[in-house]
Amino acid sequence: MAPQQQTSPHRDAGGPTLKIADTSAQDIALAPRDPRRKWLLLAGIAILAIALVAVAAPWVARWASATVSVPYERVRTATVQRGDLVRDVSVQGRVVAAVSPTLYASAAGTITLNVQAGEQVVAGQVLASVDSPELTNQLQQGEASLAQRKLELDRQRIQTRQQALERRKAADLAEVAVIAARREKRRAEQAREKGVIPEIDYEKAQDDLQNAELAYEHAVADADLYDERLSFELRASAFEVNTQELVVEDLRRQVGDLSIKSPVDGIVGDLLLEQKAAVSRDMPVMAVVDLTRFEIDAMIPESYADDLAIGMNAEITVGGQTYDGQLVAVSPEVVNNQVASRIRFADNGPTGLRQNQRLTTRILLAEHADVLMVQRGQFLDSGGGRLAYVVSDDRVATRRQIETGAYSLGAVEILSGLEPGETIVISNLDPFRGADTVLLTD
Protein backbone atom coordinates (compact mmCIF):
# COMPACT_ATOMS: atom_id res chain seq x y z
CA MET A 1 0.00 0.00 0.00
CA ALA A 2 1.14 3.49 -0.76
CA PRO A 3 2.10 5.44 2.29
CA GLN A 4 -0.34 7.98 3.43
CA GLN A 5 0.74 11.50 3.08
CA GLN A 6 0.02 13.82 6.01
CA THR A 7 -1.12 17.26 5.24
CA SER A 8 -0.46 20.09 7.46
CA PRO A 9 -2.81 22.88 7.61
CA HIS A 10 -1.65 26.09 6.16
CA ARG A 11 -3.07 29.11 7.19
CA ASP A 12 -3.25 32.05 4.95
CA ALA A 13 -2.84 35.28 6.48
CA GLY A 14 -6.11 36.58 7.33
CA GLY A 15 -7.97 33.39 5.86
CA PRO A 16 -9.51 30.08 6.88
CA THR A 17 -7.51 26.78 7.37
CA LEU A 18 -7.28 24.29 4.18
CA LYS A 19 -6.99 20.36 4.34
CA ILE A 20 -5.59 18.21 1.25
CA ALA A 21 -6.85 14.50 0.98
CA ASP A 22 -4.37 11.56 0.25
CA THR A 23 -4.75 8.51 -2.29
CA SER A 24 -5.62 5.96 0.27
CA ALA A 25 -9.09 5.64 -1.14
CA GLN A 26 -7.69 4.42 -4.55
CA ASP A 27 -5.39 1.63 -3.29
CA ILE A 28 -6.43 -2.12 -3.89
CA ALA A 29 -5.23 -5.02 -1.87
CA LEU A 30 -3.68 -7.82 -4.12
CA ALA A 31 -4.08 -11.53 -3.42
CA PRO A 32 -0.92 -13.69 -3.10
CA ARG A 33 0.37 -15.30 -6.48
CA ASP A 34 -0.40 -19.05 -7.09
CA PRO A 35 2.93 -20.96 -7.59
CA ARG A 36 1.26 -23.65 -9.86
CA ARG A 37 0.53 -21.14 -12.62
CA LYS A 38 4.20 -20.84 -13.43
CA TRP A 39 4.55 -24.59 -13.99
CA LEU A 40 1.43 -24.73 -16.20
CA LEU A 41 2.85 -21.99 -18.41
CA LEU A 42 6.17 -23.80 -18.72
CA ALA A 43 4.38 -27.05 -19.64
CA GLY A 44 2.38 -25.32 -22.39
CA ILE A 45 5.53 -23.83 -23.86
CA ALA A 46 7.22 -27.25 -23.87
CA ILE A 47 4.24 -28.90 -25.61
CA LEU A 48 4.22 -26.18 -28.28
CA ALA A 49 7.96 -26.60 -28.86
CA ILE A 50 7.57 -30.37 -29.28
CA ALA A 51 4.78 -29.85 -31.83
CA LEU A 52 6.88 -27.40 -33.78
CA VAL A 53 9.80 -29.81 -33.82
CA ALA A 54 7.55 -32.64 -35.05
CA VAL A 55 6.18 -30.50 -37.85
CA ALA A 56 9.55 -29.06 -38.89
CA ALA A 57 11.47 -32.34 -38.69
CA PRO A 58 10.89 -33.33 -42.39
CA TRP A 59 11.90 -29.86 -43.49
CA VAL A 60 14.97 -29.99 -41.34
CA ALA A 61 15.82 -33.44 -42.73
CA ARG A 62 15.49 -32.12 -46.29
CA TRP A 63 17.75 -29.20 -45.57
CA ALA A 64 20.21 -31.50 -43.83
CA SER A 65 20.36 -34.03 -46.72
CA ALA A 66 20.48 -31.50 -49.57
CA THR A 67 23.78 -29.82 -50.26
CA VAL A 68 22.41 -27.46 -52.93
CA SER A 69 19.09 -25.67 -53.19
CA VAL A 70 17.54 -24.37 -56.39
CA PRO A 71 14.25 -22.49 -56.80
CA TYR A 72 11.58 -24.78 -58.17
CA GLU A 73 10.39 -22.27 -60.76
CA ARG A 74 13.82 -22.32 -62.38
CA VAL A 75 13.64 -26.00 -63.37
CA ARG A 76 11.51 -27.97 -65.80
CA THR A 77 10.37 -31.50 -65.06
CA ALA A 78 8.83 -34.33 -67.07
CA THR A 79 7.42 -37.76 -66.30
CA VAL A 80 8.99 -40.96 -67.59
CA GLN A 81 6.47 -43.06 -69.51
CA ARG A 82 6.15 -45.81 -72.09
CA GLY A 83 5.17 -45.16 -75.70
CA ASP A 84 6.19 -45.29 -79.34
CA LEU A 85 9.28 -43.25 -80.13
CA VAL A 86 9.64 -41.97 -83.69
CA ARG A 87 13.23 -40.98 -84.43
CA ASP A 88 13.23 -38.06 -86.81
CA VAL A 89 15.04 -34.94 -87.87
CA SER A 90 13.52 -31.57 -88.69
CA VAL A 91 15.19 -29.36 -91.29
CA GLN A 92 14.43 -26.22 -93.21
CA GLY A 93 14.32 -26.68 -96.99
CA ARG A 94 13.53 -24.63 -100.02
CA VAL A 95 11.05 -25.45 -102.74
CA VAL A 96 12.56 -26.28 -106.12
CA ALA A 97 10.92 -27.48 -109.29
CA ALA A 98 11.30 -31.23 -109.78
CA VAL A 99 11.79 -30.59 -113.50
CA SER A 100 13.70 -27.45 -114.39
CA PRO A 101 15.77 -28.10 -117.52
CA THR A 102 18.27 -25.59 -118.83
CA LEU A 103 18.29 -25.21 -122.62
CA TYR A 104 21.60 -24.85 -124.48
CA ALA A 105 22.66 -23.72 -127.93
CA SER A 106 23.46 -26.76 -130.05
CA ALA A 107 25.82 -24.93 -132.42
CA ALA A 108 27.67 -21.68 -132.87
CA GLY A 109 25.73 -18.87 -134.49
CA THR A 110 23.32 -16.04 -133.79
CA ILE A 111 20.46 -16.58 -131.32
CA THR A 112 16.90 -15.42 -131.95
CA LEU A 113 14.64 -15.46 -128.88
CA ASN A 114 10.93 -16.11 -129.46
CA VAL A 115 9.71 -15.78 -125.83
CA GLN A 116 10.14 -13.54 -122.81
CA ALA A 117 11.00 -14.44 -119.21
CA GLY A 118 7.93 -15.58 -117.26
CA GLU A 119 5.98 -16.55 -120.37
CA GLN A 120 3.85 -19.69 -120.25
CA VAL A 121 5.00 -22.35 -122.74
CA VAL A 122 4.00 -25.87 -123.75
CA ALA A 123 6.10 -28.89 -124.58
CA GLY A 124 7.43 -28.79 -128.14
CA GLN A 125 7.06 -25.03 -128.53
CA VAL A 126 9.98 -23.32 -130.29
CA LEU A 127 11.48 -20.91 -127.75
CA ALA A 128 14.54 -19.77 -129.69
CA SER A 129 16.48 -20.54 -132.84
CA VAL A 130 20.14 -20.37 -133.80
CA ASP A 131 21.21 -19.18 -137.24
CA SER A 132 24.27 -21.29 -138.16
CA PRO A 133 25.33 -20.88 -141.83
CA GLU A 134 28.25 -23.25 -141.33
CA LEU A 135 26.08 -26.11 -140.13
CA THR A 136 23.48 -25.46 -142.85
CA ASN A 137 26.23 -25.57 -145.50
CA GLN A 138 27.55 -28.85 -144.08
CA LEU A 139 24.08 -30.33 -144.41
CA GLN A 140 23.79 -29.23 -148.02
CA GLN A 141 27.20 -30.67 -148.84
CA GLY A 142 26.30 -33.91 -147.10
CA GLU A 143 23.04 -34.22 -149.04
CA ALA A 144 24.85 -33.57 -152.32
CA SER A 145 27.49 -36.18 -151.47
CA LEU A 146 24.76 -38.68 -150.62
CA ALA A 147 23.02 -38.12 -153.92
CA GLN A 148 26.33 -38.61 -155.77
CA ARG A 149 27.06 -41.84 -153.93
CA LYS A 150 23.62 -43.15 -154.76
CA LEU A 151 24.21 -42.41 -158.45
CA GLU A 152 27.56 -44.17 -158.31
CA LEU A 153 25.94 -47.16 -156.66
CA ASP A 154 23.29 -47.37 -159.38
CA ARG A 155 25.97 -47.06 -162.09
CA GLN A 156 27.99 -49.81 -160.41
CA ARG A 157 24.98 -52.08 -160.32
CA ILE A 158 24.56 -51.66 -164.10
CA GLN A 159 28.25 -52.27 -164.74
CA THR A 160 28.18 -55.29 -162.48
CA ARG A 161 25.32 -56.85 -164.39
CA GLN A 162 27.09 -56.08 -167.67
CA GLN A 163 30.40 -57.60 -166.58
CA ALA A 164 28.65 -60.62 -165.09
CA LEU A 165 26.84 -61.11 -168.35
CA GLU A 166 30.15 -61.07 -170.30
CA ARG A 167 31.67 -63.62 -167.95
CA ARG A 168 28.61 -65.81 -168.28
CA LYS A 169 28.79 -65.43 -172.06
CA ALA A 170 32.40 -66.65 -172.06
CA ALA A 171 31.36 -69.66 -169.98
CA ASP A 172 28.55 -70.42 -172.40
CA LEU A 173 30.91 -70.21 -175.40
CA ALA A 174 33.30 -72.56 -173.62
CA GLU A 175 30.41 -74.96 -173.10
CA VAL A 176 29.61 -74.83 -176.84
CA ALA A 177 33.26 -75.56 -177.60
CA VAL A 178 33.08 -78.62 -175.33
CA ILE A 179 30.04 -79.86 -177.19
CA ALA A 180 31.78 -79.40 -180.56
CA ALA A 181 34.91 -81.17 -179.32
CA ARG A 182 32.87 -84.13 -178.15
CA ARG A 183 31.21 -84.33 -181.52
CA GLU A 184 34.57 -84.28 -183.29
CA LYS A 185 35.84 -87.00 -180.99
CA ARG A 186 32.91 -89.24 -181.86
CA ARG A 187 33.53 -88.62 -185.54
CA ALA A 188 37.19 -89.47 -185.04
CA GLU A 189 36.29 -92.70 -183.23
CA GLN A 190 34.00 -93.76 -186.05
CA ALA A 191 36.64 -92.93 -188.63
CA ARG A 192 39.27 -94.82 -186.65
CA GLU A 193 37.07 -97.90 -186.53
CA LYS A 194 36.78 -97.74 -190.30
CA GLY A 195 40.47 -97.05 -190.60
CA VAL A 196 40.05 -93.90 -192.66
CA ILE A 197 42.05 -91.53 -190.38
CA PRO A 198 45.45 -91.95 -188.93
CA GLU A 199 45.91 -92.59 -185.22
CA ILE A 200 47.45 -89.20 -184.67
CA ASP A 201 44.29 -87.42 -185.81
CA TYR A 202 42.25 -89.44 -183.35
CA GLU A 203 44.56 -88.48 -180.50
CA LYS A 204 44.33 -84.86 -181.55
CA ALA A 205 40.53 -85.03 -181.30
CA GLN A 206 40.90 -86.35 -177.75
CA ASP A 207 43.27 -83.50 -176.85
CA ASP A 208 40.88 -80.94 -178.30
CA LEU A 209 38.05 -82.33 -176.18
CA GLN A 210 40.13 -82.15 -173.02
CA ASN A 211 41.20 -78.59 -173.82
CA ALA A 212 37.57 -77.58 -174.41
CA GLU A 213 36.38 -79.18 -171.15
CA LEU A 214 39.20 -77.52 -169.20
CA ALA A 215 38.45 -74.15 -170.76
CA TYR A 216 34.77 -74.58 -169.90
CA GLU A 217 35.52 -75.41 -166.25
CA HIS A 218 37.78 -72.37 -165.93
CA ALA A 219 35.21 -70.12 -167.58
CA VAL A 220 32.49 -71.26 -165.19
CA ALA A 221 34.73 -70.83 -162.12
CA ASP A 222 35.88 -67.45 -163.35
CA ALA A 223 32.28 -66.34 -163.87
CA ASP A 224 31.28 -67.46 -160.35
CA LEU A 225 34.29 -65.74 -158.75
CA TYR A 226 33.62 -62.59 -160.73
CA ASP A 227 30.02 -62.60 -159.52
CA GLU A 228 31.24 -62.78 -155.92
CA ARG A 229 33.69 -59.92 -156.46
CA LEU A 230 31.03 -57.76 -158.06
CA SER A 231 28.61 -58.55 -155.24
CA PHE A 232 31.24 -57.57 -152.66
CA GLU A 233 31.94 -54.30 -154.45
CA LEU A 234 28.23 -53.56 -154.55
CA ARG A 235 27.91 -54.18 -150.80
CA ALA A 236 30.93 -51.94 -150.13
CA SER A 237 29.38 -49.17 -152.18
CA ALA A 238 26.06 -49.69 -150.41
CA PHE A 239 27.84 -49.38 -147.05
CA GLU A 240 29.36 -46.09 -148.18
CA VAL A 241 25.91 -44.86 -149.11
CA ASN A 242 24.53 -45.93 -145.73
CA THR A 243 27.40 -44.18 -143.96
CA GLN A 244 26.71 -41.00 -145.86
CA GLU A 245 23.01 -41.33 -145.03
CA LEU A 246 23.89 -41.48 -141.34
CA VAL A 247 26.08 -38.39 -141.73
CA VAL A 248 23.26 -36.53 -143.46
CA GLU A 249 20.76 -37.72 -140.85
CA ASP A 250 22.99 -36.42 -138.05
CA LEU A 251 23.45 -33.10 -139.84
CA ARG A 252 19.70 -32.83 -140.26
CA ARG A 253 19.29 -33.51 -136.54
CA GLN A 254 21.80 -30.80 -135.73
CA VAL A 255 20.04 -28.36 -138.00
CA GLY A 256 16.75 -29.31 -136.40
CA ASP A 257 18.27 -28.69 -132.97
CA LEU A 258 18.96 -25.14 -134.04
CA SER A 259 15.30 -24.61 -133.17
CA ILE A 260 15.35 -24.78 -129.34
CA LYS A 261 12.09 -26.35 -128.15
CA SER A 262 10.57 -26.59 -124.68
CA PRO A 263 10.86 -30.14 -123.28
CA VAL A 264 8.02 -29.62 -120.76
CA ASP A 265 4.99 -27.49 -120.05
CA GLY A 266 5.95 -24.66 -117.75
CA ILE A 267 7.18 -21.11 -117.47
CA VAL A 268 10.27 -19.56 -119.02
CA GLY A 269 12.81 -18.68 -116.35
CA ASP A 270 15.55 -16.09 -116.68
CA LEU A 271 16.85 -15.45 -120.18
CA LEU A 272 20.61 -15.89 -120.08
CA LEU A 273 21.33 -14.17 -123.41
CA GLU A 274 20.32 -11.03 -125.22
CA GLN A 275 18.40 -10.99 -128.48
CA LYS A 276 20.61 -11.65 -131.55
CA ALA A 277 23.60 -12.42 -129.38
CA ALA A 278 26.45 -14.54 -130.75
CA VAL A 279 26.54 -17.95 -129.10
CA SER A 280 28.94 -20.86 -129.05
CA ARG A 281 28.14 -24.52 -128.85
CA ASP A 282 26.66 -25.69 -125.49
CA MET A 283 26.16 -22.13 -124.23
CA PRO A 284 23.15 -21.89 -121.83
CA VAL A 285 20.26 -19.91 -123.28
CA MET A 286 17.35 -20.13 -120.82
CA ALA A 287 15.65 -22.38 -118.27
CA VAL A 288 12.10 -23.72 -118.28
CA VAL A 289 10.45 -24.39 -114.92
CA ASP A 290 7.73 -27.02 -114.56
CA LEU A 291 5.52 -25.67 -111.77
CA THR A 292 3.32 -28.75 -111.56
CA ARG A 293 5.83 -30.87 -109.64
CA PHE A 294 7.91 -29.64 -106.73
CA GLU A 295 10.60 -31.05 -104.47
CA ILE A 296 12.29 -29.87 -101.29
CA ASP A 297 16.02 -29.19 -101.35
CA ALA A 298 17.17 -29.59 -97.73
CA MET A 299 20.51 -29.60 -95.90
CA ILE A 300 20.69 -32.22 -93.12
CA PRO A 301 23.26 -32.11 -90.28
CA GLU A 302 26.20 -34.45 -90.70
CA SER A 303 25.35 -36.30 -87.48
CA TYR A 304 22.34 -37.84 -89.22
CA ALA A 305 24.20 -38.76 -92.42
CA ASP A 306 24.73 -42.42 -91.48
CA ASP A 307 21.02 -42.87 -90.75
CA LEU A 308 19.74 -41.44 -94.03
CA ALA A 309 18.51 -43.79 -96.73
CA ILE A 310 16.67 -43.21 -99.97
CA GLY A 311 12.97 -44.05 -99.63
CA MET A 312 12.50 -42.79 -96.06
CA ASN A 313 9.14 -41.17 -95.34
CA ALA A 314 8.93 -37.47 -94.63
CA GLU A 315 6.34 -34.93 -93.52
CA ILE A 316 6.30 -31.50 -95.15
CA THR A 317 4.50 -28.65 -93.39
CA VAL A 318 2.87 -26.08 -95.67
CA GLY A 319 0.60 -23.40 -94.23
CA GLY A 320 -0.09 -25.38 -91.07
CA GLN A 321 -0.98 -28.55 -92.99
CA THR A 322 1.18 -31.66 -93.27
CA TYR A 323 1.83 -33.43 -96.58
CA ASP A 324 3.48 -36.80 -97.09
CA GLY A 325 6.83 -36.93 -98.83
CA GLN A 326 9.73 -39.24 -99.53
CA LEU A 327 13.50 -38.89 -99.45
CA VAL A 328 14.60 -39.47 -103.05
CA ALA A 329 18.23 -38.32 -103.10
CA VAL A 330 21.12 -38.03 -100.64
CA SER A 331 24.43 -36.46 -101.59
CA PRO A 332 27.53 -38.61 -100.96
CA GLU A 333 29.48 -35.49 -99.95
CA VAL A 334 29.52 -33.53 -96.70
CA VAL A 335 29.80 -29.77 -97.21
CA ASN A 336 30.04 -27.41 -94.23
CA ASN A 337 29.00 -30.24 -91.86
CA GLN A 338 25.80 -30.76 -93.85
CA VAL A 339 24.50 -33.29 -96.35
CA ALA A 340 22.39 -32.18 -99.31
CA SER A 341 19.17 -34.13 -99.84
CA ARG A 342 16.09 -33.98 -102.03
CA ILE A 343 12.56 -34.71 -100.74
CA ARG A 344 9.66 -35.27 -103.12
CA PHE A 345 5.96 -34.83 -102.40
CA ALA A 346 4.10 -38.16 -102.38
CA ASP A 347 1.46 -36.60 -104.64
CA ASN A 348 1.80 -33.48 -106.72
CA GLY A 349 1.88 -31.45 -103.51
CA PRO A 350 -0.19 -28.42 -102.55
CA THR A 351 -1.06 -25.67 -104.99
CA GLY A 352 0.36 -22.19 -104.74
CA LEU A 353 3.94 -23.16 -103.99
CA ARG A 354 6.66 -20.78 -105.12
CA GLN A 355 10.20 -21.39 -106.23
CA ASN A 356 12.71 -21.06 -103.31
CA GLN A 357 9.90 -20.94 -100.72
CA ARG A 358 11.14 -22.03 -97.27
CA LEU A 359 9.34 -25.02 -95.70
CA THR A 360 9.84 -27.19 -92.62
CA THR A 361 10.40 -30.86 -93.35
CA ARG A 362 10.44 -33.76 -90.88
CA ILE A 363 12.27 -36.90 -92.00
CA LEU A 364 11.24 -40.10 -90.18
CA LEU A 365 14.47 -42.01 -89.56
CA ALA A 366 13.17 -44.93 -87.45
CA GLU A 367 10.30 -46.00 -85.18
CA HIS A 368 10.71 -47.76 -81.81
CA ALA A 369 7.52 -49.27 -80.41
CA ASP A 370 6.67 -49.52 -76.68
CA VAL A 371 9.86 -48.05 -75.22
CA LEU A 372 10.57 -46.16 -72.01
CA MET A 373 11.01 -42.50 -72.89
CA VAL A 374 10.95 -38.98 -71.53
CA GLN A 375 10.70 -35.51 -72.99
CA ARG A 376 13.93 -34.09 -74.40
CA GLY A 377 15.63 -31.25 -72.59
CA GLN A 378 18.91 -29.58 -71.81
CA PHE A 379 19.72 -32.24 -69.22
CA LEU A 380 20.94 -34.42 -72.11
CA ASP A 381 23.66 -31.92 -72.98
CA SER A 382 24.67 -30.84 -69.49
CA GLY A 383 24.56 -34.41 -68.17
CA GLY A 384 26.02 -36.04 -71.25
CA GLY A 385 22.98 -38.30 -71.56
CA ARG A 386 24.20 -40.35 -68.57
CA LEU A 387 22.84 -38.32 -65.64
CA ALA A 388 19.37 -37.42 -64.39
CA TYR A 389 17.85 -35.97 -61.21
CA VAL A 390 14.73 -37.78 -59.98
CA VAL A 391 12.30 -35.49 -58.13
CA SER A 392 10.48 -36.93 -55.11
CA ASP A 393 7.16 -35.78 -53.64
CA ASP A 394 8.93 -33.54 -51.10
CA ARG A 395 10.77 -31.76 -53.94
CA VAL A 396 14.16 -33.30 -53.36
CA ALA A 397 16.01 -34.11 -56.59
CA THR A 398 18.27 -37.15 -56.32
CA ARG A 399 21.10 -37.81 -58.72
CA ARG A 400 20.92 -41.06 -60.70
CA GLN A 401 22.96 -42.67 -63.47
CA ILE A 402 20.95 -43.44 -66.64
CA GLU A 403 21.54 -44.84 -70.11
CA THR A 404 19.84 -43.27 -73.14
CA GLY A 405 19.06 -44.75 -76.54
CA ALA A 406 17.39 -43.31 -79.62
CA TYR A 407 16.59 -39.62 -79.88
CA SER A 408 13.69 -37.86 -81.55
CA LEU A 409 12.79 -34.21 -81.84
CA GLY A 410 10.66 -34.29 -78.68
CA ALA A 411 11.70 -37.37 -76.71
CA VAL A 412 14.61 -39.63 -75.81
CA GLU A 413 14.63 -43.36 -75.14
CA ILE A 414 15.65 -44.47 -71.63
CA LEU A 415 17.43 -47.83 -71.63
CA SER A 416 18.16 -48.07 -67.92
CA GLY A 417 18.19 -46.06 -64.67
CA LEU A 418 14.58 -44.84 -64.60
CA GLU A 419 11.15 -46.36 -64.09
CA PRO A 420 7.76 -45.42 -65.57
CA GLY A 421 5.99 -42.70 -63.60
CA GLU A 422 9.11 -41.12 -62.15
CA THR A 423 9.60 -37.38 -62.55
CA ILE A 424 12.98 -36.02 -63.56
CA VAL A 425 14.48 -32.61 -64.16
CA ILE A 426 14.83 -31.99 -67.92
CA SER A 427 16.21 -28.44 -67.74
CA ASN A 428 19.88 -27.48 -67.52
CA LEU A 429 21.65 -29.34 -64.69
CA ASP A 430 24.53 -26.88 -64.28
CA PRO A 431 22.89 -25.10 -61.26
CA PHE A 432 22.88 -28.47 -59.40
CA ARG A 433 26.72 -28.49 -59.48
CA GLY A 434 26.82 -32.29 -59.56
CA ALA A 435 25.34 -32.65 -56.05
CA ASP A 436 23.87 -36.01 -55.04
CA THR A 437 20.71 -34.35 -53.70
CA VAL A 438 19.25 -30.95 -54.49
CA LEU A 439 16.45 -29.18 -52.64
CA LEU A 440 13.89 -27.51 -54.89
CA THR A 441 12.66 -24.56 -52.88
CA ASP A 442 9.44 -22.63 -53.31
Image (cartoon, rainbow, N blue to C red):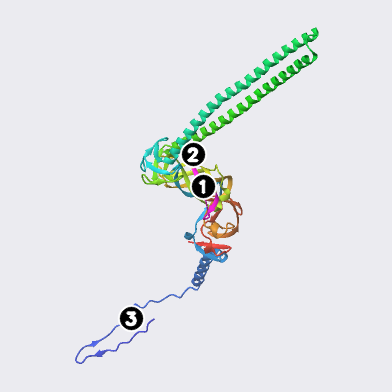
* Mark-to-mark CA distance, 1 and 2: 16 Å
Classify 204 as above or below 127.
above
* Mark-to-mark CA distance, 1 and 3: 109 Å
Classify 185 as above or below 31.
above
Does 317 lie within the magenta span? no
Between circles 1 and 3, the one closer to the viewer is 1
Amino acid type at image mark 3: Thr
Residue furthest to the bottom in view is: 13
Give x and y (percent) for residue 48.
51, 66
* Label located before the other in sequence (3 or 2): 3
Residue beneath label 1, please? 341
Give x and y (percent) for residue 234.
58, 28
Please tell me the numbered disc located at residue 346.
2
* Label located before the other in sequence (1 or 3): 3
* Mark-to-mark CA distance, 3 and 2: 111 Å
Please tell me the numbered disc located at residue 23.
3
- 237 with respect to 190 (left or right): left
Amino acid type at image mark 1: Ser
Between circles 1 and 2, the one closer to the viewer is 1
Give x and y (percent) for residue 62.
55, 63
Amino acid type at image mark 2: Ala
User: In front here: 409 or 416?
Assistant: 409
Classify 327 as above or below 178.
below
Bin the neighbour count of mark 2 within 10 Å (Cα to Cα): few under 14, some 14-19, many 20 and up: some
Q: Are marks 1 and 2 in contact (CB under 8 Å)?
A: no
SS state under label 3: loop
Residue shown at the point (66%, 25%) measured from the top left: 225
User: In front here: 179 or 389?
Assistant: 179
- 350 with respect to 429 (left or right): left
What is the quadrant of residue 114 in the picture?
top left
Q: Which residues are magenta?
A: 332-343
Bin the neighbour count of mark 1 within 10 Å (Cα to Cα): few under 14, some 14-19, many 20 and up: some
